[in-house]
Image (cartoon, rainbow, N blue to C red):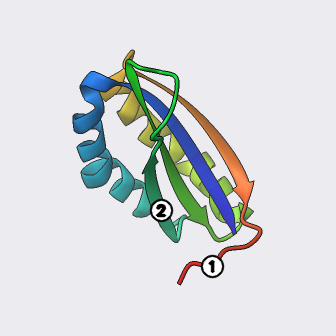
């Protein structure tokens, strides 16, 4: 299993709108691609950016083939929607991690 981790630093004044949009629109759109088996959204509780909030959205992919297909076929369009809605109000970076062990039920 792979974790596609998206870390977003966003202006505090858009936090509530962004979070609602992520929960109601963006994440459901990503999940509808069928390339991920689950997701989670987290917020950093302690950081140095006093004017910003930092979130992570983690999507769990079954294997590299599913992640690669998402990146090639779906990612650009979905990322474009975020950019159009919040341009200049956020910064993002993405990482891929291998899930080595877990105890989720």
Q: Which residue is drawn at 54% across and 58% down?
A: 59
Q: Mark 2 points at which residue?
A: 39
Q: In this view, does 1 lie to the left or right of 83?
A: right
Residue placed most toward the observer, 64 or 3: 3
Percent of width and height locating residue 32:
40, 63
Q: How crowded is mark 2: few (under 14 residues within 10 Å), some or many (20 or more)?
A: some
Check the image and report above or below for 38 versus 41: below
Query: Which comes sooner in the sequence, label 1 or label 2?
Result: 2
Q: Residue at x 63, y 79 (%)?
A: 103
Check the image and report above or below for 103 versus 84: below
Q: Which residue lies furthest to the top in this view?
A: 88
Q: How far apart are marks 1 and 2 (CA)?
A: 16 Å
Q: Name the residue under label 1.
A: 103
Q: Which residue lies furthest to the front in this view?
A: 46
Number of numbered markers? 2
Residue placed most toward the observer, 40 or 48: 48
Residue placed most toward the observer, 74 or 3: 3
Check the image and report above or below for 19 versus 82: below
* Discs 1, 2 touching: Cβ within 8 Å: no
Quadrant of the rendered structure where residue 63 is? bottom right
Percent of width and height locating residue 10:
40, 27
Percent of width and height locating residue 61:
61, 65
Percent of width and height locating residue 77:
45, 39
Check the image and report above or below for 69 versus 15: below
């Amino acid at each position: 299993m792979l974790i596609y981790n998206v870390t977003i630093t966003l202006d505090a004044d858009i936090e509530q709108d962004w979070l609602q949009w992520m929960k109601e629109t963006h994440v459901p759109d990503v999940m509808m691609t069928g390339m991920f088996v689950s997701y989670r959204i987290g917020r950093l509780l302690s950081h140095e950016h006093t004017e910003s909030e930092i979130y992570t959205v983690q999507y769990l992919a079954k294997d590299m083939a599913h992640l690669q297909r998402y990146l090639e076929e779906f990612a650009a369009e979905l990322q474009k929607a975020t950019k159009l809605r919040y341009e200049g109000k956020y910064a993002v970076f993405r990482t891929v991690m291998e899930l080595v062990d877990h105890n989720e039920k």
